[in-house]
Image (spheres, helix red, strand yellow):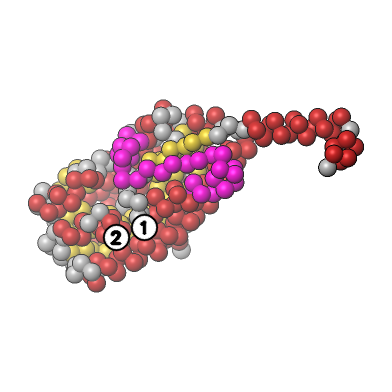
Amino acid sequence: MKRLIIGLGMGTLTLILLVGTAVAQQPEVTLRAGIMVSKDYPFTKGALYFADKVKERTNGRVKVDVYPDGVLGNEIEMFEQVKRGALDIVVTSPGNLSPFIKEIDLLDLPFLFKDHAHRDAVANGPVGKRYADVIEKKGEVVVLGYFGGSVRNMICRTKAINSIEDIQGTKMRVWQSSVVIDTWKALGTVPSVVAYAEVYNALQTGVVECAENESLTFTTAKWAEAAKAVALTQHSVTIRPFLMSAKNFAKLSKADQEVVRAAGAEAAAYEVKLEVEQDKVARDLLSSKYGIKVTTPDRKPFIERSEAVRQAFAKSVGAEATLKEIYGLAK
């Protein structure tokens, strides 16, 4: 070994020393990811998958700590933290971004997608890319990918839904999104804004008769324990942006930025596949474990009565052409 070192030229030895110094000077980084749902939910598992890939590809130098169960705040609060750089990463619904990026609500419109294939064609194609650019420009965030893939349905505490007529006048839990509220009004319900963490009690006590969400939420958040019926309205196949603070992303080296982007894209693909699989399992549990009556009302009247809301929203944000493009991607 001594002979080898002695035989090295000064230029080669200097290069080795410089490379070694550069590697040693690469900073250790810890990123924090806030997730609203439980540790068992695919969002959390997707974030953990992302953390593993980043750790592996940086030899443990870049670490991602994942905080589920909303311990860092609700989705809107966490998104605001990400914008400021106080938090690094969040998964959130388009509706929660709408106070900052109004046009993003288009991706959360009920009855927008025909099926999973339609959703994927939008999220992974030119429409998804354009919206990522809009989010990055207006939201001061970087879009690492799109989580989602679950199908949203109605859940009711006592009332089985066999047709659209059965929901007329029903008090329906919604979240703070104007297009969601307008849609359920158009469908004949009486929308009531209830925070996510309070839905179980709202169903249990009759504050609302029905709510809507993924089957995974019905089981993991235990809404199914407070309900007797589920209607497969299939009004949404979810798209959930996986975001990182632009301020904190810019602090990473170019090499680390490439690692984070690549890991984000892979985590999104992993999460969507997992979410679709777990959503089906959860849907089966509704009847087999919880004894819930599951009905399949005709979707056509729901789609027809809510179409004016989709068209009006698209017009209000200058997205008529995008809405038409999305419809055209259905097979």
State if disc 1 and disc 2 touch (CB < 8 Å).
yes
State the mark number for residue 215.
2
Q: Is residue 39 visible?
A: yes
Mark 1 surroundings within 10 Å by alpha-carbon count, few (fewer than 14), some (14 through 19), many (20 or more): many
> Where is residue 203 drawn, in percent x and y?
14, 53
Residue at 90% of width from left, 37% of height from top? 7
Residue at 49% across / 36% down in the picture? 30
For numbered disc 1, what is the local secondary structure?
strand
What residue sits 24% from the left and 45% below the top? 196
124 or 68, which is in the foreground? 68
Q: Earlier in the sequence, mark 2 or mark 1?
A: 1
| Residue 111: quadrant of the picture | bottom left
Q: Which residue is mark 1?
A: 150
Q: Is residue 312 magenta?
A: no
Magenta stretch, residue numbers: 50-78
Mark 2 and mark 1: span between their CA atoms?
Answer: 8 Å
